[in-house]
Amino acid sequence: MVLSECKRLFADQTLVEARVIHDFLSSGWSINFVDKLGNDNPLTDIYGISCSYDSLEQAEEKVHQIANCPISIDNLFRFTDR
């Protein structure tokens, strides 16, 4: 979903949460939005390619530009955060 679609779906209250996910292949962070049924909908560019952000802060800032919603963070390397 592109940015405008995400904004529209939040306005329609179809999306309920954002998940910021660490992408170990690109060492970046991607954003998936969760709908009421629990389906993940990745934030993409106009070509359908998932957007990747350099830092967790950049990804969170992008979510806040779209909607004020709950954000969960999924870091595949949680064991290194200890």
Image (cartoon, grey):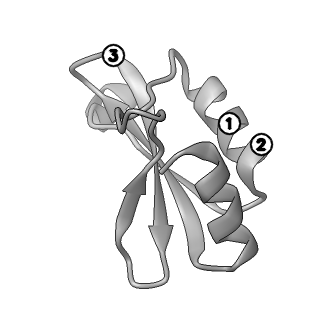
Residue at image coords 65%, 27%: 57
**Mark 1: amino acid:** Lys
Find the distance from the CA under tag 3 to the CA under tag 1. 17 Å
Q: Nearer the viewer, residue 28 or 5?
A: 5
The furthest residue to the left: 25
Residue marked by disc 3: 27
Left or right? Give the position of 24 relative to 28: left
Left or right? Give the position of 26 relative to 60: left
Residue marked by disc 2: 65
User: Is disc 2 in contact with disc 1, using a CB cutoff of under 8 Å?
Assistant: yes
Residue 41, position as x, y percentages in the image: 40, 58
Q: Quadrant of residue 82?
A: top left
Circle 1: element type: helix
Q: Which mark is residue 42?
A: none
Residue 53, position as x, y percentages in the image: 51, 22
Q: Quadrant of residue 44?
A: top left
Residue marked by disc 1: 62
**Mark 2: amino acid:** Gln
Left or right? Give the position of 24 relative to 47: left
Considering only vertical position in the picture, is 8 above or below 78? below
The disc, 3 or 1, on the residue closer to the chain's N-terminal end is: 3
